[in-house]
């Protein structure tokens, strides 16, 4: 069977058409306020879900990091990590990595957990694992499931840790990831809510840019 290859101007025209359709879809969602929902293909039961910003989310599955643009549905291979690496984001939304090591201890003077971040070591008596990390703040919990669960807030710059109540890791109502009983992943988002959040956080720079046009 002969295959027709789209080249040159025709390929560019198709790419522009896709972008136009995406823009039209976004405008319609802004007008109607509808929630968009779709299943992510090729990714099931991720070990970690990390939002870089309102539009880009990274999935960690079996050592593979995959980034998804929730608007265009385009996926991108980010890299590979070891099984003992926890992924977070810095203040600019870029990925940062924490290596986790646990040890058996025999005295109160020893450390059962070591976090390695950018060549530095943070040592803790408690056996803990990270569950959330953004900027310099990390939230960790007891790593052993059959023990009483405790939660901690860690400043990764100073290394200071304090115990906190069960953290209220709130779900973003404008965009979130859900998983069904079979491990299938679904994206749910309201473009109007995402745009509103973006303008609230970036209104000063946004309107400053408009004034320069």
Image (cartoon, rainbow, N blue to C red):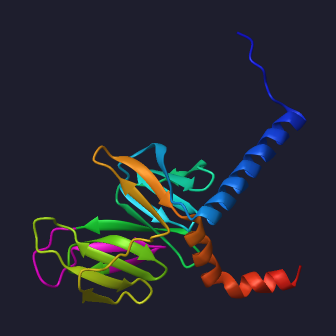
Decide which of 129, 70 is in the foreground and name it.
70
Q: Residue furthest front?
A: 32
Please give the name of the residue rendered at 68% of the width and 84% of the height, measured from the top-left corner. 203
Decide which of 72, 49 is in the foreground and name it.
72
- The stretch of residues the image draws in magenta is 103-122
6 on left or right of 71: right
84 on left or right of 72: left
User: Which corner quadrant holds the N terminus?
Assistant: top right
Please give the name of the residue rendered at 61% of the width and 56% of the height, measured from the top-left corner. 71
Decide which of 197, 154 is in the foreground and name it.
197
Say if residue 130 shows up in the picture: yes
Which secondary structure class fits the magenta region best?
loop
4 on left or right of 61: right
Decide which of 18, 136 is in the foreground and name it.
18
Please give the name of the residue rendered at 80% of the width and 46% of the height, measured from the top-left corner. 16
Q: Position of residue 3 (x, y in %)?
A: 74, 17
Q: Position of residue 123 (x, y in %)?
A: 30, 80
Q: Quadrant of residue 209?
A: bottom right
């Amino acid at each position: 069977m002969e295959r027709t290859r789209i080249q040159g101007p025709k390929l560019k025209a198709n790419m522009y058409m896709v972008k136009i359709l995406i823009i039209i879809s976004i405008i319609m969602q802004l007008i109607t306020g509808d929630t968009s929902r779709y299943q992510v293909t090729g990714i099931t039961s991720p070990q970690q879900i990390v939002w870089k910003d309102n539009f880009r989310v990274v999935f960690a599955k079996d050592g593979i990091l995959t980034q998804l643009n929730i608007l265009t549905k385009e996926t991108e291979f980010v890299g590979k990590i070891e099984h003992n690496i926890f992924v977070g984001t810095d203040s600019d939304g870029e990925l940062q990595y924490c290596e986790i090591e646990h040890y058996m201890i025999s005295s109160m003077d020893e450390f059962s957990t070591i976090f390695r971040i950018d060549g530095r070591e943070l040592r803790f008596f408690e056996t803990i694992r990270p569950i959330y990390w953004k900027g310099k703040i990390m939230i960790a919990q007891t790593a052993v499931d059959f023990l009483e669960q405790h939660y901690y807030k860690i400043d990764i710059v100073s290394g200071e840790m304090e115990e906190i109540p069960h953290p209220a890791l709130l779900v973003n109502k404008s965009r979130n990831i859900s998983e069904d009983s079979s491990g299938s992943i679904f994206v749910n988002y309201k473009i109007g809510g995402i745009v509103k959040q973006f303008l609230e956080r970036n209104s000063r720079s946004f309107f400053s840019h408009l004034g320069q046009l």
